[in-house]
Structure formats: C-alpha cells, structure tokens
Amino acid sequence: MDLQLALLFLQQGVASGLVVGSVYALLALAIVIIFRTSEVPNFAQGEMLMAAGYVALYLFVFRAMPVWAAIPMTIVVAFAGAALFRRVVLTQVAHASGSPVNLVIATLGLSYVLKGLVRQTGFGDTPRSFPALVSTDSIMIGQASVTRLDLAILGTAVIVMAAFFWMFGYTKLGRAMRSVGMNPKAAQLVGVNLNRIHTTIWGLSGAISAIAALLISPKLLMTADMGSVVTLGFAAAIVGGFASLPGAVVGGFIIGIVEQLVGLFVSSRAITLAPFLAIMLVLILRPQGLFGGRVVIKKV
Amino acid sequence: MSKRAPGRLSALAAACFAVMSLPVAGFAQEPGLTDKTIKIGMFAPLSGPNMAYGFDVANAARMYYDKINKEGGINGRKIEVVLEDDRCNANDLVAAVKKLVERDQVFLLNGGSCSAAVVAAKDYVVRSKIPLIMLNASGDGALYPPTDYIFGAFSISQYAVGGAIVDFAAKTLGAKKIAYINHDDAYGVWNLEGSKADAEAHKVDLQVESISPTITDVTAPFFKLRAVNPDALAIVTYARPAALLIKKAYELGFNKPIILSVAGTANLSQLAENVGSKDALKNFYVQDVLADLPGGPKIKWVYDMYKEAYPDLAAKPDHPQAYMPYGIPSAMSIVNALKDAGPQPTREKVLEALKKQHFDSGVMAGPVVFGPQERAANKSTIFIKFDGTNQVLQPGVYTSRWQFKG
C-alpha cells in the first residue's frame, strides 16, 4: 500500500468511524445510565432501539405522519415503553426475588418479546429502508468522503450527548440520578423517590435508544435483528469504563474508528472481530475501562 | 386328537406357505412401490417466515406429478405424494424426512428448499440409502463430495453462482479487473472457488473482499475495492448487505457496472426501495436462473399450468411466489429417472438413472446435467438489466466452468 492510499484510508477511517462511533456512543450512554443506577446490564437495549426504529417507520412511512410529529412521538413511545417495563415488570421481579440475575434475565426476556412482536407485525420479514431525513449527497472533508446525512448523525448525537450531560450535571433530576447511582439508601434518606428515579432513567434510556434508532436506521436496513448493533454499544461501554458516562462516549468513538481502520488496513473479515479484540485488550490491561477509575473490590 | 390331526397338518402347511411367501413378496417390492402406485415423500417450508422459499416450489412439483398421472402415470403407476412441512428448519426437516421414510415408507424423497436445513438430513439419507432429490435448495454441503443418494441444486449450485457472474462480466462487459464481494461463510467460500475457476479461464484479475452477513457499515470494504479501480463490481451477498453496498456505491459516485448475484434478488422492488434512489441502479445487472424473465414467453406455460392447478392461490396477490418454477425441473428429473429405471424400478436403478440425467427442462437457464461425480443440476444463469422499474433480458446464457475435482 502506498503512502497516498494509506493517508486516504486513514482519513476515511477516522471520518466514518466518528459517524458510526457517535451512534455507538449514544447506545453506550443508554446502557451505562441504567447500569450506574441499578447495576443491571440491560440486554434488551438493542431490541429497544430496533422496536423504536419500527415505531418510527410505521408512523413515518406507513401512516405518512409528518416528520415533526413522527420523531417526537417515537421518542415518547420509547420513553413510555421503557419506563413501563421498569415500573411493571422489573419492580415485580425485584420484589419477588431481589437477585440482580433475575433482573438481567427479565431484560433478556424483554429482548425476545420485542423481537417477537416486530416479527408478528410482518414488517420485520424483509429488510426495509428508513427514509433519510437529510440528503445523502457526498461532501469531501480532506480526502475523506462523507454524506450530509453522516454529518447530521454526528451533529445530532453530539448535541444529544451534551444535553444529557448538562441534565445529569446541572439539574435537580440529574443530581438525584447521580445520588441514586452513588448511594441509593442515602439518596432515599434525603427524600429522593427511588422508584421514580429508576423509572425515569429507564425512560431516558429508551428515549436515547430511539434517537440512536432514528439516526442509524437510514444507514442500516431495518430488520428484526438490527438490535445486534448494541453489541458495539456494550463494547464501547466496556472500553470506556462501564460506570463512566464520558467513558461510554469516548469508548463509542474508539470502537467506531477502530472498526473502520481495521477494515481498511487489515481485512474486511476482521471488522466484526475488532471490537471484541478491543474489549479483550482493555479487560486485560485496564479492567475498569479507560475512564473507570480505580477497581473497587466489594468485600462480602 | 388323532381325528383332528389331518386338519391341523393342512393348517400348518398353509401357515408355512403363507410365511414363506411373505418375504418373497417383500423383497420383490421396494418400500413405497406397488403395481399401481409410487409413493414420493415431499418436504418444503409450508408455513413460517421462510415459506416463500418453498411453498409454491412444492406446489409446482405436485402439479407436474398430477400432469404425469393424468397422462397415465409412469409404466402404469400413479404418483402418490406425501407432503410434510419442514419450515426451513434443520430439526423440523430431519423429523419430516424420518417420518416419510420410516412411517410413510416412501420410495424416494423430493424436498428441501433451504440449504442449511437440507444439509442436516445428509447423514440420515445416506445411511438409509434412500434417494433424495432436492426441490430448489442449492444444498452444496450435501452434494459434494458426491454420494450415491443425494442430487440437487436445481436452482443453481453456489459454486456456479460466482463463476457465472465472472463469465458475464468478462464476456459481455469486457471486464479485466473485477471487484468481488462475498460473505465470509461457507457459501462465500464455495462461490469464490467457482469464481476463481472462471477468472482464471478469462484471465480476469479478481479482487476479493469477504464480509460478515451481519455487517452494519460497508464503507471499509467498499473503499478498498474502489481503490483498485475495477471494471465492474460483483456483489455475491444476501439482500441486506447487497442493498447497503449499492447504496454506498451511489453515495460515493461509483459508476462502473454493478452485478448482483441471484442470492440477493428475492425481492427486486424492495431492493429498489432500499437503495433509496433509482440513480443508484443506472448501471445495474441482476443474475437469474430461469430460462426467461419471470412470466416471459419461454416459461409462460409454467405460470399457466399453475393458474389452472391452483386457481384460488393464483388469485392471491403474492402468488405464484418468485421461486415457483424451480419445482418443475426437480420433478422432471424424478419422472425421467423413474421412466429410465424401467417397469420394475428399484431405488438402486433409479439412482443409476439419475446419474445419467441430461435434459433441458425448458424452465431453467441451463440443462439439468448429472454425472458420475456431478450432483448439482444447474450451473447456468441469465442476466437482467434492472433500472428500478424495468427488467431487460441480456442476450446469452452464462455458465460456470467449475467442476468438482475430488
């Protein structure tokens, strides 16, 4: 490979990696906010994204609803669905057993239910395209070629993440969420309603998944299995540090860029392998993740 | 007691005669065969999400058997079909095959529309020494290395899919360098092997990128292939990655011919919708395995026969399903082999006759050709220029040179 081609590949890899990485970052954020406050990895996060995508497709394409109505309605439906799951199912599972393992199994159950529901509608039988809301015309940044849609995806993801960080850092709700993540009993003692906060966090996680779905769906083709993209969100969360919000974002961009560079410089076959190698490396060299702080061992 | 002895003796003699005569009759007739009937065990996906792969294919084979029965049958025997639902699922398929062989005692098997599922029945079929003639599955995993019992790929062998594309790109488009993108699974390995045989024959430079069928972003593989400045892009993937690649090619202004393999063409109108713009299909060709455009004059008789046999189904909007005609050459092969096996057919005689089949079904792009080492019926394809709405048949039939070498 000559130098000029290597430079082209490098620029393209970074540009494309930032775009897809921004969606992985959103997904990682959705995973981490639930994990930080309840220590439950939500294995239905991908299917929440998939289901939200199909809700948007139904409203926007099959019901011909205008964009300005379809997008907020999708986000509201995703928020309500996730919050309802937390309120109705997880609360009952927690009361019945209290074991985190049962909660994890409940999220796995949700993933199968959502996939089954979409398949049942018949919309998931064939790959479908979600119309891009922004033009897919190419523009050059340096030697890298990206579309206007790519830039819109990156821009929207960054704005959503910034808004979320502001909410988490500077609002009363955000402070309550952080306190529940740090010490739920102490938070409850000072008047924080744990149930309300957990339900809101699940709802927010659903809403972030819906935004990720709206961004990524025009680039992927929609199928009932599109939720598998969440594996890369988990990879991003692990690389960044499973309990760190900034780590999740950085991890998303790292996974996106590594994926592209491995595909361009090593082999297309290695694209699906690259995130898992990154996870292995992080787990061996820095188990708490890049932004995870010190490893805390809980004594039993 | 002594008075009754002669009666007992004659009863004993009669019983001995009956016992002795039973095995004789049993050996004379193979399972599923009487003087008046031949029982054929069929299996296909009759329900579930993969029904489109085989429901109407099985219907096509059945309507052909009905036609043969109306014409007097085969050497005076009428064909009886026992049909089972395999749901394109390996477990269901093997269960269906065992039921047909052990309980229904069929003479031979005619089934399989999904390759991965039908390959799962290979060991049982070979152990049971029962002929299996697939419906429309490629099923290369069960066809090679060849056994005496399994015949298939009436649609096309995966080995031939890529080779026929290379043949078309080299002969018709004059391509000297072909960017070739396939899957990194067994199907990808098989079609690449066939492509290499044809690339070598045409002295074509084949630049290959193999991708996962679940890939979400095709930027990297497409960029690598574009960087080699190919004369044509051959996409030998399933429908979803294919649509992503065509879309990416359009976004990046790639204007060389794009050829899509038959594996990605199940629903062309959906493909046109998925790539987002008709401009993405300006220089676009799709591979097909029929002798003509679907419903075209050469194969109109198949569609007419279907309408007559299944008027209620034909009135429904999604019928006949796209792969319906593929059932005809499979049924034709069985009928021909049964005829060739003579008035007292055995499974062994039919298997020997199958190995010698060489005929033009009039339905598929190429003839059905089996041989001592050849178990895949079809290696030929046609190509259609598709602009998102119209389909224009390109002249010629393109055949892979690939041969099993052992």
Image (cartoon, coloured by chain):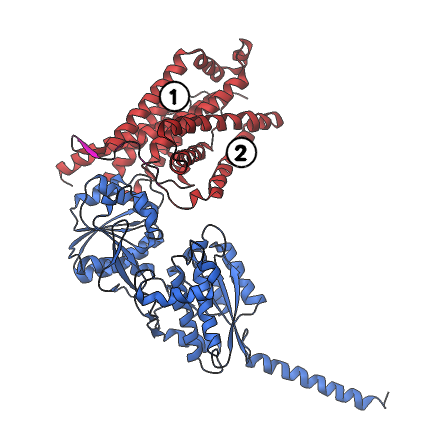
Chain colours: A red, B blue
x, y percent for residue A239: 36, 28
Residue A234: which quarter of the image?
Answer: top left
- The segment highlighted magenta reads A129-142
Q: Residue at x 44, y 66 (%)?
A: B308
Residue A221: which quarter of the image?
Answer: top left
Query: Going by the image, does B104 lie left or right of A32?
Result: right
Q: Nearer the viewer, residue B179 or B335?
A: B335
Q: Residue at x 30, y 41 (%)?
A: A270
The residue labelled by disc 1 is A245
SS type, badge 1: helix
Q: CA distance from mark 1 to mark 2?
A: 24 Å
Amino acid type, mark 2: Ile
Amino acid type, mark 1: Leu
Q: Residue at x 38, y 60 (%)?
A: B138
Q: Is residue B374 above or below residue A232?
A: below
Q: Residue at x 47, y 24 (%)?
A: A203
Query: Going by the image, does B49 lie left or right of B187?
Result: right
Q: Is residue B385 above or below residue A267?
A: below
Q: Nearer the viewer, residue A281 or B192?
A: B192
Q: Quadrant of the N terminus of chain A?
A: top left
Q: Which of the two labelled residues, at mark 1 and mark 2, occupies the earlier sequence position?
A: 2
What is the crowding at mark 1: few (fewer than 14 residues within 10 Å), some, or many (at least 20)?
A: many
Q: Is residue A73 above or below residue B106?
A: above
Q: Main secondary structure of the magenta part?
A: loop
* Residue A105 - label: 2
Q: Nearer the viewer, residue B313 or A24?
A: B313
Q: Quadrant of the C terminus of chain A?
A: top right
Is any atom of residue B152 visible in this view? no
